[in-house]
Amino acid sequence: MEFSKFIEWSFYSLIAGGLSFFLYTLLGFKKSVDELNKNVAVLIEKSNWIIQNVESHEIKIHELQLKLTKLEIECAKLSIYNQGKGL
């Protein structure tokens, strides 16, 4: 084998090896990005569930505050009524 042919073969082998390494690394990046996308989707879904849960609790708290206010008004009316009767 001539030396120039050997150099040419070595050069092409080096390019092929470099290209193979580049493609392997690129596929690793793709797999990593796909996994990241799945994890972000799960995180978004969980945060949406939490937001809905918090909004539901806010509504329940508001309803309880209204009931408490009504009870406080009734207690105040009874207190005024009882004071008027001299109890």
Image (cartoon, rainbow, N blue to C red):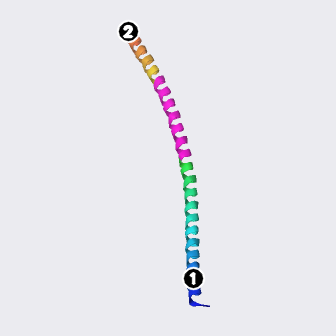
Residue 66 in the image: above or below residue 25: above
Dot 2 alpha-carbon crowd within 10 angstroms: few under 14, some 14 to 19, many 20 or more: few
Q: Position of residue 35 (x, y in %)?
A: 57, 57
Mark seen at residue 30: none
Please identify the dominant SS of the magenta region: helix
In the depicted view, which residue is nearer to us: 45 or 70? 45
Q: Name the residue under label 1.
A: 8
Lower position in the chain sequence, tag 1 or tag 2:
1
Residue receiving disc 2: 84
Residue 47 within the segment the image draws in magenta: yes
Type of amino acid under label 2: Gly
Whether residue 50 can be seen here = yes
On whether residue 58 falls in the magenta region, the answer is: yes
From the viewer's perspective, is 74 left or right of 13? left
Q: What stretch is highlighted in magenta?
A: 44-67
- Amino acid type of the residue that numbered disc 1 sits on in the rendered structure: Glu
* Percent coordinates x, y for residue 72 in the rendering: 43, 21
